[in-house]
Image (tube, rainbow, N blue to C red):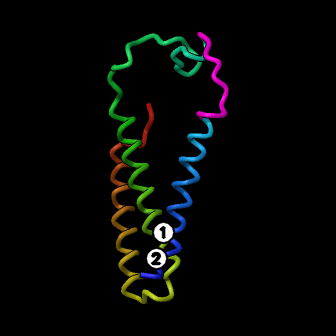
Amino acid sequence: MIEYLPILIFLVFALIFSFGAFFLSIIIGKKSPYTEKNSTYECGFEPFDETRGKFEVKFYLVAILFIIFDLEIIFLFPWAVAFNEIGMYGFWSMIFFLFVLTVGFVYEWLKGALDWN
């Protein structure tokens, strides 16, 4: 378990740093509310519709695509770091994984899911 000690130290440091920054901003930060600061902001325009409006499916599709390709990077980084130790089985497993992702990407592209009209 001693191998996990640096990870534990990093997590504890990250938590202390993030909560410390959050609470210090509350304590030290200026509190000067005014109407413009407290108003609803919508890309520089005044709000013109209710906030519970429906979004197009394209927004969700883009979010899902982002998550998929983000997960791809999450799997590729440790694979690249341990590339010398995993051998040919690990190499071909990742090639198959990338092939499946590529087929999905081409399918979405051909279906027009990436066209932003």
Give the secondary structure at mark 1.
helix
Q: Are marks 1 and 2 in contact (CB under 8 Å)?
A: yes
> What residue is at 53 percent from the left and 68 percent from the top?
9
What's under tag 2, amino acid-wise? Tyr
* Residue drawn at 54 percent across, 14 percent down: 39
Using the rendered view, name the quadrant where residue 106 is placed.
bottom left
Residue 99's mark?
none
Q: Specify few, some or many for label 1: CA neighbours under 10 Å numbering under 14, 14-19, or 20 or more.
A: few
The quadrant of the image that shows the C terminus is: top left
Query: What residue range appears in magenta?
Result: 26-35
- The location of residue 107, given as percent across then percent down, is 33, 53
- According to the picture, the residue beneath numbered tag 1 turns out to be 8
Residue 25 position within the rendered picture, expressed as x and y whole percent measured from the top left? 62, 36
The x, y position of residue 29, in whole percent, is: 65, 31
User: Above or below — where is 28 with respect to 53?
Assistant: below
Residue under the point 37% across and 35% down: 58
Determine whether the residue tagged by mark 2 lies in a helix, strand or loop: helix
Q: Quadrant of the N terminus?
A: bottom left
**Between residues 17 and 44, which one lies in front from this camera angle?**
17
**Residue found at the very far front of the displayed protein:** 27
Find residue 92 and report its horizontal and vertical position in percent. 38, 81
Q: Is residue 30 magenta?
A: yes
Whole-number angstrom distance, CA of label 1 to CA of label 2:
6 Å
Three-letter code, disc 1: Leu
What residue is disc 2 on? Answer: 4
Relative to 105, does residue 78 appear above or below in the rendering?
below
